[in-house]
Each structure stands twice: as C-alpha cells, then as structure tokens.
Amino acid sequence: QVTLLESGGGLVQAAGALRLSCAASSSTLTTDAMAWFRQAPGSERELVAAITGNGRATNVADSGKGRFSISRDNVGNMVSLQMNSAKPEDTAMYYCTEARGWPARYWRTGEYTNWGQGTQVTVSS
C-alpha cells in the first residue's frame, strides 16, 4: 500500500496563505482520485478538495471556493493544497487521501481507502 505523508502545516495569520503537500511513497495510479479532508476538534472529518487521477478536474468544498485549490504531480507523486485568504475556521488537522477511480460520493470519507497521518493547520485571528 502506498504511504501518504503530509507536510506544510503550521501557524498562519488570518488572510495569510499556506501550501500543504502530500508525498506518496510510490506512484499513485493516474486513474485514482486524491483528496484533502480536514477535521477540527469535536467535528466530523470533511472534504476540502478532490482531484481526478489525471488532474483535469477538481472539486473544492464550498468552504474553500475562491480560496483553496488542489493540484497533483503524477510524475513527482505529489498532491498539493494551496490555501489562500486563510480564516480561523480553517483551523484543523488536514489529511491527504486516495481512492480507487473517482468515487460517486467523493465527499464521503468512506469512499477513500488510504490516509496519511495528517498535518495541523492553525489560523490565528
């Protein structure tokens, strides 16, 4: 199984920017979706953004539209999440994950089969 390792989290001031990266230990299939989820204390894990295997289509949750973007580099086995105009409510643990193909319910955690350990993002007001 491919190991996913997130990095790039940290403390950022509101309105600032942060770029999260997810490195895969080996090649992920270009048919497999990748996504970022986040989980704040006391809350359920929720989708942040997802991207198709070939990187040509993305979906960003309403909470991040206009601020977040997801991209992938299948040659370098990396998936990134660019976070701009950060808000305190973006504070959470951010997880990288992958799924076989493009899940019909791509916003559900159960559709994803492999998860990283997460990277903490804290946005100060």
Image (cartoon, rainbow, N blue to C red):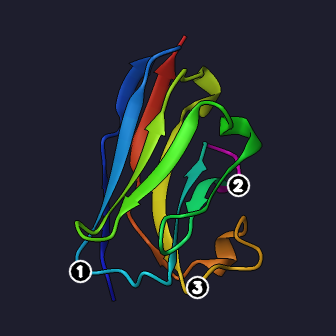
39 is within the stretch colored magenta: no
- Mark 2 neighbour density, 10 Å: few (under 14) some (14–19) many (20 or more): few
Compared with 107, 38 (above or below) is above
Residue under numbered circle 3: 101
Residue at 66 percent of width and 70 percent of height? 109
Which range of residues does the magenta coloring cover? 41-46
x, y percent for residue 47? 66, 55
Q: In front: 88, or 41? A: 88
Compared with 12, 99 (above or below) is below
Task: Answer with mark 3 or mark 2, whichever residue precedes in sequence.
Answer: 2
- Location of the C terminus by quadrant is top right
x, y percent for residue 72? 39, 60
Point out the residue furthest to the front here: 56
Residue under numbered circle 1: 26
Label annotation for residue 105: none
Going by the numbered disc 2, the residue's amino acid type is Glu
* CA–CA distance in space, label 1 to label 3: 17 Å
Q: Is residue 111 left or right of residue 76?
A: right
Task: Answer with mark 2 or mark 1, whichever residue precedes in sequence.
Answer: 1
x, y percent for residue 121? 44, 35
Going by the numbered disc 3, the residue's amino acid type is Gly
- Location of the N terminus by quadrant is bottom left
* CA–CA distance in space, label 3 to label 2: 24 Å
Q: Is residue 83 left or right of residue 74?
A: right
- Mark 1 neighbour density, 10 Å: few (under 14) some (14–19) many (20 or more): few
Compared with 11, 108 (above or below) is below
